Amino acid sequence: MIKKMIVLCVLLSALALSACGGGATPQPAAVVATPGSTVIVESTATIDPCAPQYERVLAQRVHNHMREFDDASTLAASLTADKLPSAIAELQKIRRASQDEPVPSCLGKLKNLQVAHMNMVIDTLLGMLNGAKPEVLQTGISNARKLHDGYTVELANVLGLTVVAPVAQTPASGAVTVSNAGVSPVNTRATPDLNGAIVTAFAVNEIAVVLGKSADGKWVQVDVAAQPGTKAWVFLEAVTLTGSLDAVPVVTP
């Protein structure tokens, strides 16, 4: 009975103190009664969202929007003008979700770079739709690449990773190649299918020698620069082809 009275008194005192206007703001507290002893009041620690274990989880949430945007922008770049409006609307939807994603101050730079990249891509696509001059479009593409590169570096810093630039390939004279002249990386896949497993990303400005083509001519097989000896498939409409596929052999997955 005495122990119950002690606990009640402590609780009432805590409530009375929390109702007072003066003094420091009280921290959330837990009341712990140990057998045969007095009541102990322990302060509950406040979670720091910028602590490494939480920062990385929140960064992944931010990056999920970027991955979705990269896939959608790659698809948009391969569409005809009459299909661009719906693709742009989808990109705007992803951008809004990114803008609405709450982040702590330590991820502010990452989010700002992400949204700036998305804005640049959308503005450039709108420019294409509205007949902007080629030099204006080229500037938009270049700026979008720089923002994406900046985002990638910042994400690596947050995750504690090292950014490794893709190994540059020097194609032999006359070789058939593909390059990524777009504003975002292009997924390479294990099979010539949009549902195929993703092997890696074909980076912006990366060049690869074509090793083979699919039976329908819509995909080409290349070496993965970041993984020597590994081959992957690239959707031809998402990259720029240099040379002719006429003499390139058909490869069966």
Image (spheres, grey):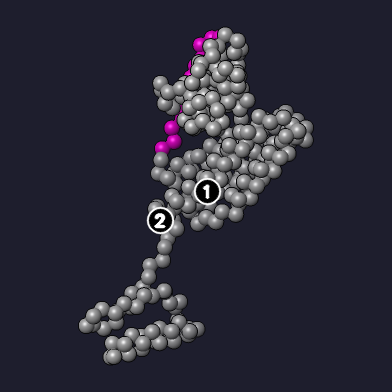
Residue at the location (38% across, 84% down)?
11
- Above or below, 172 against 142 in this view is above
| Front residue of 10 and 109 | 10
Please name the residue shown 63% across and 50% down the image. Answer: 96
Q: Do the residues labelled 2 and 1 touch (CB within 8 Å)?
A: no
Indicate yes or no whether the magenta region holds residue 165. Answer: yes
Q: Which mark is residue 51?
A: 2
Residue name at image x 57 percent, y 41 percent: 68
| Residue 186, visible in the rendered structure | no
Give the crowd class for mark 2: few <14, some 14-19, many >=20 residues within 10 Å: few
Residue at disc 2, secondary structure: loop
- Residue type for callout 1: Val
- Residue 212's spot in the image, x, y percent? 52, 16
Nearer the observer: mark 2 or 1; the answer is 1
Q: Which of marks 2 and 1 is nearer the N terminus?
A: 2
Q: Residue 62 bears which disc, if any? A: 1
Classify mark 1: helix, strand or loop. helix
Distance Cα–Cα, label 2 vs label 1: 16 Å
Residue 222's x, y, as percent? 50, 20
Q: Nearer the viewer, residue 198 or 42?
A: 198
Could you tell whether 192 is left or right of 237 in the image? left
Q: Main secondary structure of the magenta part?
A: loop
- Start-end of magenta stretch: 162-175
Classify 42 as above or below 221: below
Query: Percent from the top left, x then y, of residue 242?
Result: 60, 16
Image position of 186 (left or right of 52): right
Q: Does the magenta run of residues contain 194?
A: no
